[in-house]
Amino acid sequence: MVTRRAEAAGGAGATVDEGPAVQDHYPADAAHCYGCGARNPFGHHLKTRWADGSRTETITRFTPGPEQTAMPGYVYGGLVASVLDCSGTGSAALAGTHAAGLDLEGDGSLRYVTGTLEVRYQRPTPMSVELVVRGRVEEVKGRKVTVALTMTAGEDEVASGRVVALQLPDEMRSS
Ligand SMILES: CCCCCCCCCCCCCC(=O)SCCNC(=O)CCNC(=O)[C@H](O)C(C)(C)COP(=O)(O)OP(=O)(O)OC[C@H]1O[C@@H](n2cnc3c(N)ncnc32)[C@H](O)[C@@H]1OP(=O)(O)O
């Protein structure tokens, strides 16, 4: 499946969502994550895709609801961190799978866990606006992938951060 979602031309919005969501290709025994697991009925069900053909930029979208409030009209910072976290591990999975020469749809995705998460809260994050997280793959080194992330709400960059993700150790998998 190919999803193309053209936004307003120019500026921060000129992005196209490209290809399948990596989370739809996670192995079933590693798909329980609250942020991104298809098998977690209570989770965010984040979807991360390549943002263009270069295979270095990713995009993830999420619209928070009132239960994720910090103060009226604004999003809880832990939710912002959670969305950045799983956007980062999803980006790492896309990059690691690609670097290994695997085909996402044919072979499935490699699976990554968070080693380090950095978050910088730049502006209050407004409620009920689609948050767009863009990931930039900085390095793929062995089992380790580093991804820089920005989160925008409309025209405003509200948060940024970085995830260092490690390929999932076998002992962390469960059926
Ligand atoms: C509880 C989780 C359940 C998971 C269920 C499955 C679904 C997954 C869903 C998750 C998705 C959602 C997200 C979640 O919620 S994932 C849940 C939150 N994360 C965790 O619980 C992870 C806990 N930590 C570990 O298991 C280990 O420490 C890991 C696996 C991370 C590394 O231990 P491992 O023995 O594998 O590493 P290594 O010693 O061979 O080092 C290899 C390289 O990595 C570098 N390095 C090492 N550690 C870190 C670090 N912390 N930060 C940065 N870099 C680190 C190290 O310098 C070396 O680099 P270089 O020298 O080569 O350059």
Image (spheres, rainbow, N blue to C red):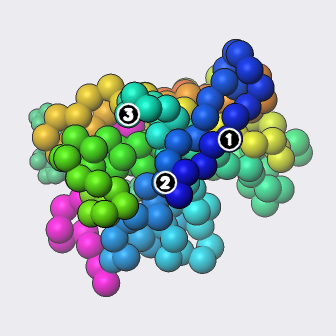
Find disc 1 in the rendering and name its residue: 5
Horizontal relation, residue 90 to residue 121: left or right: left
Residue at the (51%, 71%) spot, across then down = 38
Find disc 2 in the rendering and name its residue: 20
Q: Is residue 93 magenta?
A: no
The first of marks 1 and 2 along the sequence is 1
Residue 22 in percent (x, y) is at 43, 55
Image: magenta residue range: 162-175
Q: Farthest residue toward the bottom?
A: 175
Crowdedness near tag 1: few (<14), some (14–19) or many (≥20) residues, C-alpha within 10 Å: few
Residue 114 in percent (x, y) is at 35, 49
Q: Is residue 169 magenta?
A: yes
Residue at the (62%, 29%) spot, across then down = 15
What kind of residue is marked 3?
A: Arg
- Residue at mark 1 to residue at mark 2: CA–CA distance: 13 Å
Asked whether residue 164 is in view, the answer is yes
Find disc 3 in the rendering and name its residue: 55
Residue 149 in percent (x, y) is at 49, 31
Horizontal relation, residue 153 to residue 80: left or right: right
